[in-house]
Amino acid sequence: MPAEDEELKEEQEKEKSKKAKKNKDDKASAQSEDDEDEKESVGSKILLIFVTLVIIAIWIGIFGILIKFDVGGFGSTVLHPLLKDVPVVNKILPDVQLTESTEADKYAFDSLDEATAYIKDLEKQLASAQKKNSEDASEIEDLKSELAELDKLRQEQADFENLKQKFYEEVVFSDQAPDIKEYKTYYESIDPDNAEALYKQVVEQIQEDEEIAEYASRYSSMDPKKAAAIFDSKTMTGDLKLVAKILKAMSTQASSDILAAMNADNAGKVTKIMEP
């Protein structure tokens, strides 16, 4: 019996030993599987982080290209003022520094004296421009005054022509008025001495009137500005009475157009001569 008990104990010990070994092997296997799962989990996390970084890098690259080529003006108008002084980052900005540099160089001064001199020069230019504007305004006012005077002269000329025409119709060329040549006959019949002088004056007047009428016809057919230029010449301004006679012999419209195109001073003098 003792021998059997001993064998039974040995078998139990062996069973325990086998179970312990099996448990140990199972634990080792489980630990190994846990280690492998942990390694796989770490690898997956690293891969996920890498893919995320690649996607972010791609988007940053696309964004940088859009800024560099100034798509929509975002790079030059929004980011450039904010990032132009940030090292490295400003490399992605559009190339607009040249324009700014040129504008800055325009107002770059080496000393306060240079800046002061530049300001004084600008003040002189401003004063000159203001003076010119004032002179231009004064000249415009003078021209307006001359135009008003010319309009007045034109109206006076028209009134004079109307009065002259009325006189011719009612006195000289009316049905009751004698023929102008009868004035000549009358002068021939009076006292010889007086008649000679009067006759000579009448003949000269008739000839002069014919010449004046011829001149008037010529100048009336010319362009008013060209005719005015001739009347404003030194030759004609020396005999403004002749100019006045020629203009009197023209129609109201023709003489008014020429007077309007003449020098205002000369036109005023001629109009005074033409006054009845």
Image: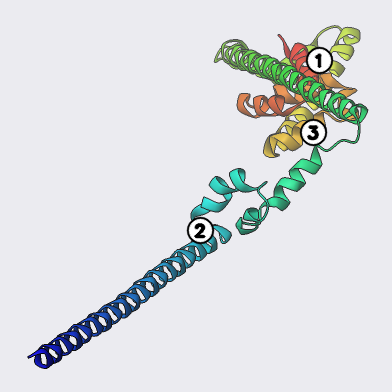
At mark 2, the secondary structure is: helix
| Mark 2 vs mark 3: in front | 2
The amino acid on which the numbered mark 2 sits, given as a three-letter code, is Val
Quadrant assignment for the N terminus: bottom left
- Sequence order check, earlier mark of 3 and 1: 1
Q: Which mark is residue 7?
A: none
The amino acid on which the numbered mark 1 sits, given as a three-letter code, is Glu
Identify whether 219 is placed above or below 71. Answer: above
Residue in view at x 86 percent, y 30 percent = 233
Residue in view at x 85 percent, y 11 percent = 195
- Disc 3 to disc 1: CB gap under 8 Å: no
Gap in angstroms between the C-alphas marked 3 and 1: 42 Å
- Sequence order check, earlier mark of 2 and 1: 2
| Mark 2 vs mark 1: in front | 2
Identify whether 191 is placed above or below 214. Answer: above
Identify whether 11 is placed above or below 238. Answer: below
Identify whether 190 is placed above or below 34. Answer: above
The image quarter in which residue 268 lies = top right
The residue that disc 2 covers is 71
Q: Residues within 10 Å of mark 2 (few under 14, many from 20)?
A: few
Q: Which mark is residue 188?
A: 1
Q: Which mark is residue 229?
A: 3
The image quarter in which residue 159 lies = top right
